[in-house]
Amino acid sequence: MTNRITQIRCVNKRCKNLNSLEDAFCHKCETPLVKRYLKIGGKLSREYKIGDSISDRFLVCYSDIVLDTKPYLLPYSPENLPPEVIPYLKLFSHRLHLPQIYGFINQENQGWLLEYNNIPLDSRGKLIYPQLFPLLEKSICHASPLRQINWLWQMIQLWKPLAKQKVLSSFFDSNNLRVNGGIIKFIDLKFDEESTPSLKNLADLWQNWLNDFDPLIKNLIEKIILSIQQNLITDIDKLLAIVDQIVYLLGNNYYCRKFSLITATDAGKKRGNNEDSCYPNVNEFKETKGGIDTLIMVCDGLGGQKSGEVASNLAINIIKEELNNSYQKTLRETLNNKNWIPLIDAVKIHNAIAKANDRITHINNQEKRQDRDRMGTTVVTSMAIAHEIYFANVGDSRIYWITKDGCHQVTVDDDLATKEVRMGSGLYRLVSANPRTGALLQALGMESSKKLKVHIRRFITDEDSIFLLCSDGLSDYDRVEQYWQSEILPILTEDINLKTACEKLLHIGLKKNGHDNITVALLQCQIELKQPDKKEGELSWQYLGEIIPDLPQPKINNFLVKKIINKPLFSAKNIIITALIIFCFGAVTWFIFQNKSSQNKSIEILPVKTFSLILFNLFD
């Protein structure tokens, strides 16, 4: 990257002040500076040198990396998007792992810009990694066993959506797979050209990393690789079920977690009443070890008057009651079950939200409310179950996942902007700038649950984390993205407590936004190692077979053969060794030939078998 002093404009359109890249906040208005590094995709019409400015805006930092020096401006996009960018848009809901199309360099349409979340930067605002994130294959040996298996679990979760867009080849470029803390990142998408990669390709990829896995899980991963290579595992769902069970045993027998949660809400500066609701009750600080006690919710009521307030309160009470009942029932059913069955799973969360929706819808229909007169509410909810965290949402309230490595938005808004992007019709930065695209496509109370899409996701917690749930009174205008480092990250370093952080976030919503009701809910997860007893600590294929009745039993011999076959025969090292062997063998043969008439000298020739063994060992 160039050594000259880099300057960027403030993202605040009323300010646009010029600041040094090293600054954290704008000198004029104190807005956090946006340091947006982008990767160039496609081909440009000309070459640019490091330090060049493209379109008087994008500073070239590395050969294919630029810095947006005017982040307050919207990017350019052509009317007709090239087919190469469409998979990025259709995979918008997976942007936690994938880049999104930010815009195009200029009107020539030959180069587009890829945007990533949470790129690691140093204290001067410069890239820590020239290629944005560290390589996965270089990171495995430094990771905990839980994180290692978590990375594999994420790859399995991403298999189907990438297959649908015919970009599974993205897995098999070693420079393309990277990580941001515990999260898998793809640098770009690679199209499946001639043939579609299979699970065997995935097994071969994992085999390349086998020696880097922690001994605690290495044997299990080896058995998984074998089972795939021997056609004992042929579909991704079966693979996921096995890895899920391994993660459960590892995540719960070797680690313990504790949780803290708190909520806060305010009507805002311009609203007469507060239509938001939350659970637990405001300022009711809770500490727990997991399960139903970690249930946390935010609802943003719709409908004006007191209708929105009624709808949001109804949703909170119904969902809470349904999940409490479901938890207690499931607990009794699974006390003596070895197999991992989550106490609160996606079906139970969906049913609770659906029941709240149908109750509000029934009231609307009974009172013959139409269109804007119908009361409704958004909902976001989160709950920790064993080693996992569940997220569910309907509407445009959001959930953010904060770790020491970044702030990740894990929900996707149910608005027109998101729909247009996922249909491949436009770029999110441009589409969302139109106020009309903020219109909600669904909320609780609008129609029957048969037509309701509840978005539910689950993630593995392998490090200390903060989960922020909030209404759009805080999330509007990217306030969370701007202030997470100064207001939320200090919780993880124990510089502030959960209650103080909650109050500060509420203050930011009031000061920087203030146009709407504001509700904030924080769930803190702290994870520690623990020493399991002998039975709990058993992580073997045999023990796994007691839990999973149809667990494959692969043959180990095939694996050993395959390891030999997979040795890189034509590597530089092997070519040199082969040349030396041929030379030595030729020299010995010539020497024997020259001296074969000599009767008083005897030369002992190495048996062919011994020579072959030496050759094999050299290659091994």
Image (cartoon, grey):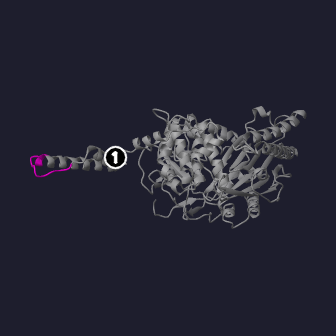
**Is 564 on the left or on the right of 142, as rendered?**
left
260 lies above or below 365: below
Q: Eyeballing the image, is 390 above or below 195? A: below
Q: Is residue 113 left or right of residue 460?
A: left
Residue at 43% across, 56% down = 50
Horizontal side, residue 31 vs residue 123: left or right: right
Q: Secondary structure at mark 1?
A: helix
Which residue is most to the right?
Answer: 367
Tell me the amino acid under the disc marked 1.
Phe
Secondary structure character of the magenta stretch overall:
loop
Q: Is residue 248 visible?
A: yes
Query: In the rendering, at what x and y percent does residue 266 appear?
Result: 81, 56
Residue at figure coordinates x 68%, y 55% from the top left: 480
The magenta segment is: 593-604
Q: Is residue 58 magenta?
A: no
Query: Which residue is pictured at 74% across the width and 49% down the height?
Result: 383
Q: Residue furthest bottom?
A: 495
In percent of width and height, residue 276 lies at 81, 50
Q: Which quadrant would residue 260 be assigned to in this image?
A: bottom right
- Report the side of 528 relative to 327 (left or right): left
Counting from the top left corner in percent of width and height, residue 335 is at: 76, 46
Q: Nearer the viewer, residue 463 or 358?
A: 463
- Residue assigned mark 1: 616
